[in-house]
Image (tube, grey):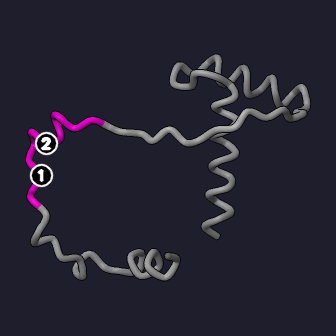
């Protein structure tokens, strides 16, 4: 699987065969819906220092796009993992 992914990432746009892919017009994008997969989660208990926890709580509370501070913690951890994995 890693070899296939590497091959795809190294492929140039010119190497992609678009002949069997229909053109997407404006109506497609007007009716398109973003589908986000809901990753499997697991409830855990961790100890976090007070200042760090308060920062996450305050940041989440002041950002209407973030529902819970736990979601923000997960997003930060996920970003870190992705960054470390792609080095």
Q: Residue, x 62% and y 18% (percent of image)?
A: 62
Q: Nearer the viewer, residue 41 or 76?
A: 41
Q: Tell me: 23 left or right of 5.
A: left
SS of the residue under disc 1: loop
Kind of element beneath mark 2: helix
**67 left or right of 4?**
right
Give above or below for 70 relative to 38. Answer: above
Above or below for 64 versus 28: above
Q: Is residue 35 magenta?
A: no
Q: Quadrant of the C terminus?
A: bottom right
Seen at 70% across and 37% down, the residue is: 42
List x then y, in percent, for residue 85. 65, 65
Is 25 magenta? The answer is: yes
Query: Do the residues bearing badges 1 and 2 touch, measured as CB atoms within 8 Å?
Result: yes
Residue 86, horizontal then vertical, whole percent: 60, 67
Which of the labelled discs sits on residue 1, or is there none? none
Between 46 and 10, the one nearer to me in the picture = 46
Determine the residue positioned at 18% across, 41% down.
29
* Magenta residues (range): 22-33
Q: Position of residue 8 (x, y in %)?
A: 38, 76
Q: Which residue is mark 1?
A: 24
In the rendered view, would you say 50 is above or below 41?
above
Residue at image x 57%, y 25%? 66
Other-residue count near label 1 (Cα within 10 Å), few / some / many at <14 / 14–19 / ≥20 = few
Q: Please tell me how crowded label 2 is: few (under 14), some (14-19), or many (20+) other residues with Cα within 10 Å.
A: few
Distance (Cα) linking label 1 and label 2? 6 Å
Q: Say which residue label 2 marks.
A: 28
């Amino acid at each position: 699987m890693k070899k296939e992914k590497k091959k795809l990432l190294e492929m140039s746009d010119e190497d992609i065969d678009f002949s069997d892919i229909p053109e997407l017009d404006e109506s497609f994008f007007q009716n398109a819906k973003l589908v986000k997969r809901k990753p499997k989660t697991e409830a855990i208990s961790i100890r976090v220092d007070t200042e760090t926890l308060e920062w996450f709580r305050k940041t989440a509370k002041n950002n209407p796009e973030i529902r819970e501070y736990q979601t923000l913690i997960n997003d930060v951890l996920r970003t870190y993992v992705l960054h470390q994995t792609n080095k």
